[in-house]
Image: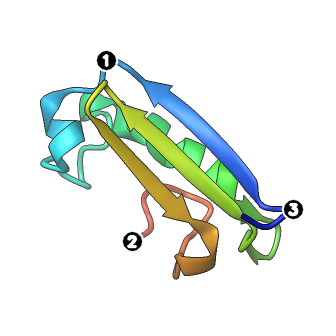
């Protein structure tokens, strides 16, 4: 790990099975409160002019699933969760 790399961890212990498996609709982000996870991603990785390459977001979805999103690998992130 680099000395100045930021790690953000979001625990979502009550994430539904649909959220943990990725079986949710991007047109209905309120289902399973995916909208909150999207906002966490934006807050962790977005800055005024782009994506923080020196940051990683970790989503702990229940006790059996974790997802890492590395800012250095993200492309096309917009500051709102509806743009994809």
Who is closer to the viewer here, 44 or 27? 44
Which of discs 3 and 2 lies nearer the camera? The answer is 3
Disc 2 crowd, CA 10 A, few/some/many (<14, 14-19, 20+) = few
Who is closer to the viewer here, 54 or 30? 54
Q: Secondary structure at mark 2?
A: loop
User: What residue appears at the point 57 percent right and 69 percent down from the top-left corner?
Assistant: 78
Residue 34, given in percent of the width and then of the height, sits at 35, 39
Is residue 25 shown above or below 48? above
- Disc 1/disc 2 C-alpha distance (Å): 26 Å
Disc 1 crowd, CA 10 A, few/some/many (<14, 14-19, 20+) = few
Is residue 30 shown above or below 12? below
Residue 58, given in percent of the width and then of the height, sits at 52, 46
User: What residue appears at the point 24 percent right and 44 percent down from the top-left corner?
Assistant: 28
Is residue 1 shown above or below 38? below
The residue carrying mark 1 is 14
The residue carrying mark 2 is 84
User: What residue appears at the point 87 percent right and 62 percent down from the top-left corner?
Assistant: 4
Residues at marks 1 and 3 touching, judged by CB atoms closer than 8 Å: no
Q: Secondary structure at mark 3?
A: loop
Q: Quadrant of residue 13?
A: top left
Q: Which mark is residue 4?
A: 3
Residue 73, given in percent of the width and then of the height, sits at 54, 79
Which of discs 1 and 3 lies nearer the camera? The answer is 3
User: What residue appears at the point 59 percent right and 38 percent down from the top-left corner?
Assistant: 9
- In primary-sequence order, the first of circles 3 and 2 is 3
- Disc 3/disc 2 C-alpha distance (Å): 29 Å
- In primary-sequence order, the first of circles 1 and 2 is 1
């Amino acid at each position: 790990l680099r000395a100045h790399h930021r790690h953000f961890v979001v625990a979502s212990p009550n994430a539904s099975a649909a959220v943990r498996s990725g079986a949710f609709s991007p047109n209905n982000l309120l289902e399973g409160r995916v909208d909150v996870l999207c906002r966490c991603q934006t807050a962790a990785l977005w800055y005024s002019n782009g994506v923080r390459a020196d940051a990683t977001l970790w989503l702990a979805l229940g006790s059996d699933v974790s997802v890492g999103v590395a800012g250095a690998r993200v492309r096309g992130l917009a500051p709102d969760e509806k743009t994809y």
